[in-house]
Image (cartoon, rainbow, N blue to C red):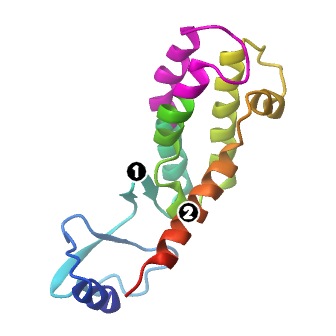
Amino acid sequence: LNRVHEFSRKCRLKFNTTKCAVVVYGKDNNPDFDLTLGSNPIKRKDGHAHLGTLLSPHKASVSAHKRSKITDCKRPAYAIGAIGSRKAPVTPESHVYETVCLPKLLYGMEVTAIPDASIIELESFHASVAKTIQGLPDQCANVGAIKTMGWIDVRGHIDIARLLFQIGRASYRE
């Protein structure tokens, strides 16, 4: 934390320490040790939201958070299913889903590890929207529904976001 504070001071970045937290993964050997950023104390938490993504060592909390993100995207995603025709791959529904729903669903996931179970949940939702837009039955293969729309899978979207995030970090000069 001292290095982070020193770097932020050099770059004239200010941290809002009331919004900062430390999430301990694994055993906390020094729970009574006070953490500080400069002279400001930092709280320890079991989980903390960062860029819309819950960071927590507890898989149940992370899974519940992902389900709530899916729920938040269901209404607009399925509402757009009634917009127009059922022709694949490029439709107004597809465009709205890719520009409104998908970014909301995946916001912040490039900065954290995502359990495979959460990826599977997100992929299932992604495929169900593709099936709805195309008017396909639920029994249709998920991969087929996604590929006929010309979409990439959720893991691909996250990987692209991670790559862009790393490029952005690499291009930053001290």
Residue 90 as seen in the image, left or right of residue 74? right
Name the spot of residue 153 as percent of width and height, x first: 71, 42
Q: Specify start and end residues of the magenta stretch as a single range.
A: 70-96
Residue under circle 2? 164
> Which of the marked residues, 1 or 2, is nearer the chain's N terminus?
1
Name the spot of residue 11 as percent of width and height, x first: 26, 84
Q: Is residue 62 magenta?
A: no
Q: Residues within 10 Å of mark 1 (few under 14, many from 20)?
A: some
Label 2 sits on what residue type? Leu
Q: Quadrant of residue 128?
A: top right
How far apart, in angstroms, are the residues tagged by discs 1 and 2? Answer: 18 Å
Label 1 sits on a secondary structure element that is loop
* Mark count: 2
Residue under circle 1? 52
Label 1 sits on what residue type? Gly
Residue under the image location 43 percent in, 80 percent down: 28
Name the spot of residue 88 as percent of width and height, x first: 73, 19
